[in-house]
Image (tube, rainbow, N blue to C red):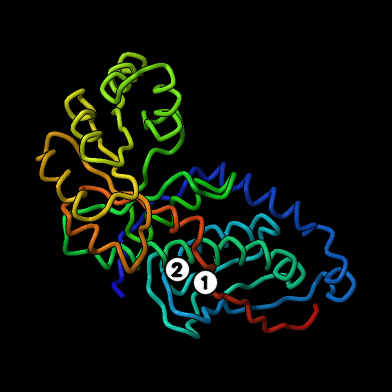
Amino acid sequence: MSERLEPVPLPDPALVYDLIAAALAEDGAHRDVTTLALVPPDQQGRGRLLAKSSGVIAGLPVAAAAFAAMDEEVELVPAVADGAWVEPMTTIGVVSGPLRSILSAERVALNFLQRLSGIATATRALTDAVADLPVRVLDTRKTTPGLRDLERYAVRVGGGHNHRFNLSDGVLIKDNHIAAARARGLSIADIVREARRGAPHTLRVEIEVTRLEEAQAALAAGADVILLDNMGLPEMAEVVTMVRGRALTEASGGVTLATVRAIALTGVDLISAGSITHSAAALDISLEVEAGTSG
């Protein structure tokens, strides 16, 4: 597995803080009855963040912000950078400060770190499989509600790229839009032209097709991107040849580690995979605390 350590800009710090604050409130972190009963307020502690399985680390700055939001005296010093590939039992950071605060913020910090690292790891697997080919791996809008900014950050850390962020970012005509338009008697070409008339001129128009004939009609009508939805590889390659650079081609549906390279070899420009966010397994990361004494 490759290692890519180019820095990826974090999402808006204010948004990250709001997400962390909501997560700490949800977890009752400031009313942690177990820790309040058992850990004196002046007891200090130190702990190692330990990756227990191999993968790509993403979210250390978010975890650090979670500890700091709980208590500004808690410090997380990373031992690796976001984007680093680590093997099992690697220390990825050290947390120190008031033990009460460390323990109360632990789960929230780990939840963000494990989730984002899992997404980065899943993304890296796909991008490595096609690294020698001229294709981009994209995410989709199949993200956890409220966490899209962070999850898409993790995709970028894993070497992937982001699709439109939300419904206002681009025209993407999907099967249900097509069904609604066909009920009014519109053809594929009519649908593309109507979308072009109704959308800002600065936005690309992309349309989902399932057959070569639909792709031909969409291209003739001026679509900027042809989305090949669950299309077989031979027909996909035929569409790519037909388009010949007059539009971008995007493959979607059935994208897995086992299929992504064959899809890329058809010559498509883009491959979108919802699985890298909606089905990514959290990376196994724990906090191993070494408690100090009081006073």
Residue corresponding to mark 1: 283
Q: Residue furthest right?
A: 37
Q: Residue at x 30, y 41 (%)?
A: 210
* Location of residue 22 in the rendering, given as x and y in whole percent from the top left corner: 69, 48
Q: Secondary structure at mark 2?
A: loop
Q: Nearer the viewer, residue 140 or 79?
A: 140
Q: Nearer the viewer, residue 193 or 57?
A: 193
The disc placed on residue 57 is: 2
Q: Is residue 98 above or below residue 233?
A: below
Q: Nearer the viewer, residue 120 or 192?
A: 192
> Which mark is first along the chain, 2 or 1?
2
Q: Is residue 217 left or right of residue 274?
A: left
Q: Is residue 67 above or below residue 142?
A: below
Specify the amino acid type for callout 2: Ile
For residue 123, what is the image quadrant?
Answer: bottom left
Pointer 1 with pointer 2, Cβ within 8 A: yes
